[in-house]
Amino acid sequence: MCLTACGGRAVNVEAQPPPTPASAVAPAGLSVRAEVHVRDTIAAQRFASGVYLLEPDGTLRSGGPQRRSAEDPMPALPRYPPILRRLDPSDVDRVWRLIGGTTLADPDSPERIPPIQDWAPLPNRSIALVQIRDHNGTRRFAVSLTGATPAAIEAQDLVERLQALAWQTPQPLTPTGTTGP
């Protein structure tokens, strides 16, 4: 469709899709691991305990929670969940948009934890351990699933997206604080 501009010149106004910004495309090698530990009823309304792993080739893995304790905060064999499905590149890009440009993308974020630091979830707090590996290196965050810091809010959005891609929904908590069938 052409319209005549004020100067009498024809202007093409065909609908053109907006260009995709470079920051909206996931970098090569992106991997995301989220260990979700739900311990309270508030977090249980939004999150399901488990391990969600997005590999660089778009493979999504999902499985039960990683067992960690104060006695063994860094298990020798971290849980490597089974393959669930392969994501479309657009799904991987959508995950990246929840990371890129946020606190989770900042290698100097004060909320990240050192890669060698032992970490165990507190018995009464719902926590996610999020590890991101991309062109900026590897970053780990231990964030509250009910917290309000920038990293906590961004990690909550990321975990919810990974859960949705893994077809997971939160399960009700049993009286002992573990998730029920």
Image (spheres, rainbow, N blue to C red):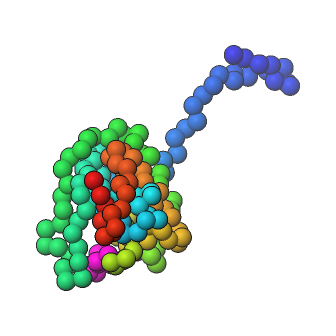
Residue at 28% x, 47% y: name it.
Answer: 60
Percent position (x, y) of residue 67? Answer: 21, 69
x, y percent for residue 164: 39, 47
Q: Main secondary structure of the magenta part?
A: loop
Dividing the image into 4 quarters, which one contains the N terminus? top right
How many numbered marks, from 0 up? 0
Say which of 99 and 144 sits in front.
Answer: 144
Q: Residue furthest bottom?
A: 71
Between residues 173 and 48, which one lies in front from this camera angle? 173
Q: Is residue 107 above or below residue 172?
A: below
Q: Is residue 5 magenta?
A: no
Across and down, in percent, residue 99 comes to 45, 58
Q: Residue furthest front?
A: 175
Residue 41, visible in the rendered structure: yes
Residue occupying the point 32% across, 41% down: 87
**Chain part drawn in magenta:** 112-121
Percent position (x, y) of residue 142? 38, 73
- 47 sits left or right of 179 in the view: right
Displayed quadrant of residue 37: bottom left
Q: Is residue 15 above or below residue 26?
A: above
Left or right of 46? Residue 87 is: left
Residue at the (43%, 65%) spot, across then down: 41
Residue drawn 43% across and 71% down?
144
Q: Is residue 33 visible?
A: no
With 123 as the anchor, is 108 left or right in this view? right
Q: Residue lying furthest top in this view?
A: 1
Residue 149 sits above or below residue 105 on the image: below
Image quarter of residue 145: bottom left
State whether residue 35 is above or below residue 85: below
Name the foreground residue: 177 vs 125: 177
